[in-house]
Amino acid sequence: MAKKPKSAMIDGNLSAVRQQMLGDGLPRFAGVAVWRANGMRPDFWPADAPSGLLNWTDEEEKRMLTMYALSGNKLTWMAATVWPSHKQDQLGSRRDIAQSDDTTTSADPGGRRNRCLEALSDAKGLGVRGFGPRAQ
């Protein structure tokens, strides 16, 4: 296997520039689903969170949720979990993967947010409430 030039390692794996320069196709599915979003900090956000960071990891199920406080009472979060390759189509198309909104479309009636919430639904001790349709 040819070694990739260093410049290829700093460009995003869904980049049009990368495809034009390297033509190496879509990335190989690694068996992990990742969701990212920005939003307002919920009321329950702890004022004493170290460096504005909340992190939860379930090593047994190989899931994680990380949230960072941003300026202006906003936050950004990322959730990741193992995902079976036979359900890869539920993660969306290349275009869907690059989007970060929580909207649903006729092509994706369940929505990315619902799949993320389902993947984390039985997380013990997570204590994250107030997001989406499962808000408590």
Image: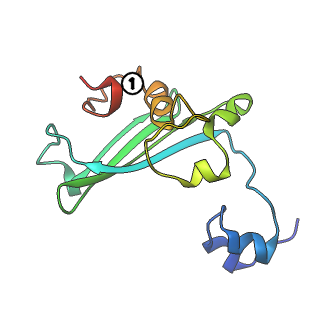
Q: Residue furthest front?
A: 106
Q: Is residue 47 left or right of residue 17?
A: left
Q: Residue at x 37, y 46 (%)?
A: 66
Q: Quadrant of the N terminus?
A: bottom right
Residue 122 position, x and y percent, is: 41, 19
Residue 34 position, x and y percent, is: 53, 44
Q: Residue furthest top?
A: 122
Most foreground residue, 79 or 37: 37
Relative vertical location of residue 5 with respect to residue 61 in this rendering, above or below: below
Residue type at tag 1 = Ala
Q: Is residue 67 left or right of residue 48?
A: right
Q: Which residue is mark 1?
A: 123
Relative vertical location of residue 1 with respect to residue 123 in this rendering, above or below: below
Q: Is residue 4 left or right of residue 56?
A: right
Relative vertical location of residue 125 with respect to residue 100 in this rendering, above or below: above
Question: Where, by quadrant of the figure, is residue 9 drawn?
Answer: bottom right
Question: Where, by quadrant of the figure, is residue 19 drawn?
Answer: bottom right
Q: Residue furthest left?
A: 47
Residue 40 position, x and y percent, is: 24, 49
Figure disc tally: 1
Most foreground residue, 134 or 85: 134
- For the residue carrying disc 1, how many other residues have a C-alpha within 10 Å: few (<14), some (14-19), or many (20+)? some
Q: Residue at x 23, y 22 (%)?
A: 136
Relative vertical location of residue 12 with respect to residue 77 in this rendering, above or below: below
Element on which disc 1 rests: loop
Q: Residue at x 11, y 48 (%)?
A: 47
Residue 33 position, x and y percent, is: 58, 40
- Name the colour scheme: rainbow
